[in-house]
Image (cartoon, rainbow, N blue to C red):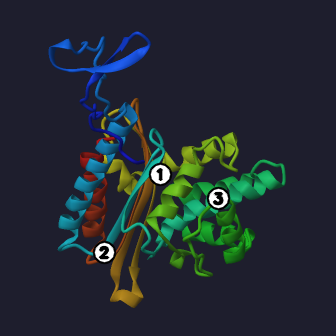
Amino acid sequence: MGILGGAVLVAKGMTEEETGGGKVPVSGAAQASPKASPSPTGPSPEELAAQERARRAKALDAALKKYAADKPEFSVAVLDRKTGETYAYRGDERYETASVVKVQVLACLLLTAQDDDRKLTAGEKALADKMIRYSDNASTTSLFGQLGRAGGISACNKRLGLTQTKVSGSWGLTRTTVKDQVKLLGELVDEKSELSEASRAYAKKLMGTVAQDQDWGVPAAARTGEGTTVKNGWLARSTENNLWIINTVGRITGDDTDVSIAVLSHANQTMPAGISMVERVAKLTRTHLKY
């Protein structure tokens, strides 16, 4: 948004006085004082808020750039539902998803059931529960095949507006961006989403009750009393000397907070080191964006 501001310039000149139907200039002490002085104009509250958001984003850019100097490659995005704005650092870089792709599989399962005007079967619920809450790979492979593999998931992604994600036949090697991941997270809560209210509630339930040993990443940036959802991905990548892909996507909600966060990374020396890094990145977004 353009910023409008500054004082209004008021031209100095001679006043005019009517005499006998004509106008003659009057100067000096004879000038009439104006009845009211024009008030200077400045930025509107909305423009001031936009300026402040831009200042915070710039500060976060600097903090992340400094932190990244001696860390493996990472990207982060934050979608703030209160403002409708997305912040992204290296937002268009693509990373292999590892298990965060399971959120895409879940969304596609829910869309497919809606298309058929039916609820999930008991079998589908059991698979979805294991896939999200326990990151079970066998359950994911079963649902991935049931939904049409890469072609089926890609079709669902298109409906959800994911334009930067390339689904792989080996589902964990799907490539995506943080921008697409927060867009997907937004679709899981947006009332205008193709996902129904019941589908959105089901996804929130699963992602809000992951196994305790998998409750890391995005939730590290939450404050006491706030709600969180999360799905993480981790993989020692054979093509990168067994260095670790560590990814986290999720949401933080509270009285004054409603944000979706995605942090994607690779080339981490160990899984614990990667977890520490993505959690630090998530916390930095909160420190500087002040959500």
Q: Which mark is residue 160?
A: 3
Q: Earlier in the sequence, mark 2 or mark 3?
A: 2
Residue sitting at x 30%, y 23%: 39
Q: Position of residue 284 (x, y in %)?
A: 25, 53
Q: Give SS at disc 3.
A: loop
- Please, is residue 117 above or below residue 73 in the view? above
Sequence-earlier tag: 1 or 3: 3
Left or right relative to 266: residue 169 = right
Q: Is residue 85 above or below residue 255?
A: below
Classify residue 151 as left or right of residue 32: right
Is residue 127 at all visible to an observer of this figure? no
Residue drawn at x 56%, y 72% is 165
Number of the label disc, if any, that sits on residue 73? 2
Give the quarter of the image for residue 153: bottom right
Q: Secondary structure at mark 1?
A: loop
| Residue under numbered circle 1 | 210
Is 242 left, or right, of 160 in this rendering?
A: left
Please name the amino acid that badge 2 sits on: Glu
Secondary element at image label 2: loop
Q: Residue furthest left?
A: 29
Between tags 1 and 3, which lies in front?
Answer: 3
Q: For residue 73, what is the image quadrant? A: bottom left
Quadrant of residue 124 in the image? Answer: bottom right
> For the residue carrying disc 1, how many other residues have a C-alpha within 10 Å: few (<14), some (14-19), or many (20+)?
many
Q: Nearer the viewer, mark 2 or mark 1?
A: 2
Mark 2 and mark 3: Cα distance apart in space:
27 Å
Label 1 to label 3: alpha-carbon separation: 24 Å
